[in-house]
């Protein structure tokens, strides 16, 4: 990679650097789609792809953003365990932690798992109430079969999530086999619970 003379910063006009910056931008867009800040994805990707540590000033200059924006992103990323500062001084360089799986699984547990669990609990409560109404009145104003279908789909999603949360990159082949087995089970479950037209 070409460097700007005397600064130690990669030259953003270099063709490869421009491509890497596009990767950073696209990763930022992906991260933003998942509810995080684009700058977090851009900063982490830049550090992960760089062959050496970078200061916050270098990161800001290369990404073309303010130092305060980079500082905020670094603070967030450090809290997630995704970047490390190499030293205690204010201008110490940073590196990316590329073992992101523990962070991903923690976020999935805290956010996505809780969302799925809240759907499952709501469905179970609605089914119980629908059963009670039917026993008391003999009426079914709501499609209880579809409530049960949604509950089955939600439980399958939870099973899939359990599998994803249990995977580690080191056990890649075992994990892929387990993922295929789980996907087959999910498809078979969908066939069982899908209503006939």
Image (cartoon, rainbow, N blue to C red):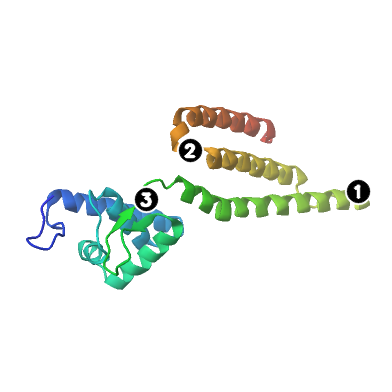
Q: Secondary structure at mark 3?
A: loop
101 displayed left or right of 16: right
- Quarter of the image for residue 70 reads bottom left
Q: Secondary structure at mark 1?
A: helix
**Disc with the residue nearer the chain's start (3 vs 2):** 3
CA gap between label 1 and label 3 equals: 57 Å
151 displayed left or right of 135: left
Residue 80 percent location from the top left of the image: 45, 57
Q: Which mark is residue 93?
A: none
Name the residue at the front extreme: 88
**Disc with the residue nearer the chain's start (1 vs 3):** 3
| Residue at numbered disc 3 | 97
Q: Which mark is residue 168?
A: 2
- x 40%, y 60%: residue: 78
| Residue at numbered disc 1 | 135
CA gap between label 3 and label 2 equals: 16 Å
The answer to whether residue 178 is seen in the rendering is yes
Say which of marks 1 and 2 sits in front.
2
């Amino acid at each position: 990679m070409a460097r700007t003379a005397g600064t130690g910063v990669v030259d953003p006009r270099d063709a490869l650097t421009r491509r890497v910056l596009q990767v950073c931008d696209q990763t930022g867009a992906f991260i933003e789609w998942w509810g995080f800040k684009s700058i977090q994805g851009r900063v982490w990707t830049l550090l992960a792809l760089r062959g050496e540590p970078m200061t916050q000033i270098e990161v800001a200059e290369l990404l073309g953003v303010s130092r305060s924006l980079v500082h905020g992103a670094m603070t967030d990323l450090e809290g997630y365990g995704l970047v490390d500062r190499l030293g205690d001084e204010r201008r110490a360089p940073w590196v990316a932690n590329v073992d992101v799986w523990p962070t991903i699984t923690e976020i999935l547990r805290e956010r996505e798992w809780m969302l799925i669990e809240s759907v499952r609990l709501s469905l179970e409560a609605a089914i119980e109430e629908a059963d009670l109404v039917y026993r008391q009145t003999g009426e079914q104003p709501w499609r209880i079969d579809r409530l049960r279908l949604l509950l089955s789909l939600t439980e399958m999603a939870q099973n899939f999530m359990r599998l994803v949360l249990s995977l580690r990159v080191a056990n890649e082949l075992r994990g892929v086999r387990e993922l295929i087995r789980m996907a087959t089970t999910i498809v078979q479950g969908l066939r069982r619970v899908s209503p006939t037209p």
